Image (tube, rainbow, N blue to C red):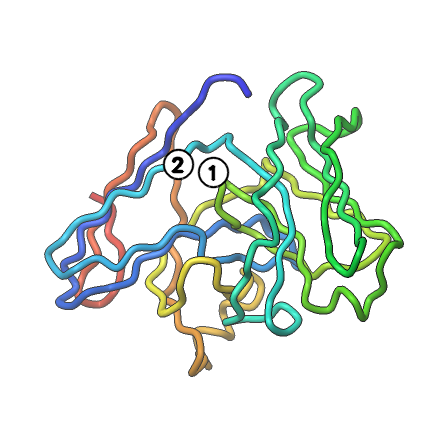
């Protein structure tokens, strides 16, 4: 895994009311839905620090009540499989299959043509109809971060060099499905009665910097301190 780097983001809420602040992950994959990855309701005048290991990735699967869509709740089907994308010969691929009326995953293994990437593979042990409410997922530091609709006979490729972190205020809880980055411009204009989020702010850690501080003001804009 190499050197462990712990990132942290400290939020001071001076908005005038309690706010549910969340961090989500996006990669630019059109098919991938960002989930509310880390979240915390912060009282007005209060502070909270989010912390995570930026190299602790996992792979897995989960379910939603309906085919995955904005506002749905992703529920992990099993604790994520540990992977080692940054280790020489480290396990970077997870097979997902269906047996005895349930999805499951096999042993992770090393695929030698991947660089800074992870793969989930599905086989033909299930049908499209059986997987309508199943999604495969990328985990960061044990929590689901990105989910993609599950289908049989498919390879899912996660390019870790494209992983980006964002701050927002939302009414959704951890594991809930956010609009993807491609949809967000229209989402802000129309919003949704079931799901709300403020304009995201990308977290940029300069070389050597592992902690960021933001203040959330009365207009629900995050200002870097």
Query: On residue 52, which mark appears?
Result: 2
Q: Is residue 17 left or right of residue 52?
A: left
Residue nearer the viewer, 112 or 164: 112
Residue 92, x across and y down, in percent: 69, 31
Q: Residue at x 76, y 47 (%)?
A: 96
Look at the picture and state if 67 lies above or below 223.
Answer: below
Point out the image quarter for the N terminus: top right
Q: CA distance from mark 1 to mark 2?
A: 6 Å
Residue 119, x across and y down, in percent: 72, 40
Mark 1 falls on what kind of element?
loop
* Circles 1 and 2 in contact, beta carbons < 8 Å: yes
Residue 60, x across and y down, in percent: 64, 46
Q: Residue at x 60, y 33 (%)?
A: 82
Q: Callout 2: 10 Å neighbours few (<14), some, many (20+)?
A: some
Residue located beneath label 1 in the image: 141
Residue nearer the viewer, 112 or 174: 174
């Amino acid at each position: 895994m190499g050197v462990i780097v712990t990132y942290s983001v400290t939020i001071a809420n001076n908005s005038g009311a309690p706010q549910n602040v969340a961090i989500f992950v996006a990669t630019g994959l059109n098919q991938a839905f960002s989930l509310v990855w880390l979240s915390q309701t912060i009282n007005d005048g209060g502070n909270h620090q989010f912390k995570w290991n930026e190299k602790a990735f996992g792979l897995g699967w989960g379910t939603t009540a309906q085919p995955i869509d904005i506002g749905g709740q992703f529920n992990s089907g099993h604790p994520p499989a540990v992977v080692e994308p940054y280790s020489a010969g480290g396990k970077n691929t997870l097979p997902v299959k269906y047996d005895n009326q349930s999805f499951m995953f096999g042993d992770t293994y090393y695929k030698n043509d991947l660089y800074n990437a992870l793969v989930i593979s599905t086989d033909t042990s299930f049908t499209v109809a059986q997987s309508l409410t199943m999604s495969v997922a990328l985990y960061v530091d044990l929590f689901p971060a990105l989910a993609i609709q599950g289908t049989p006979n498919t390879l899912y490729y996660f390019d870790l060099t494209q992983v980006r972190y964002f701050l927002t205020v939302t009414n959704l809880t951890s594991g809930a499905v956010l609009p993807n980055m491609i949809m967000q411009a229209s989402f802000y204009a129309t919003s949704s009665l079931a799901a709300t989020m403020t304009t995201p702010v990308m977290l940029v850690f300069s070389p050597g910097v592992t902690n960021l501080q933001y203040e959330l003001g009365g207009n629900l804009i995050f200002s870097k301190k």
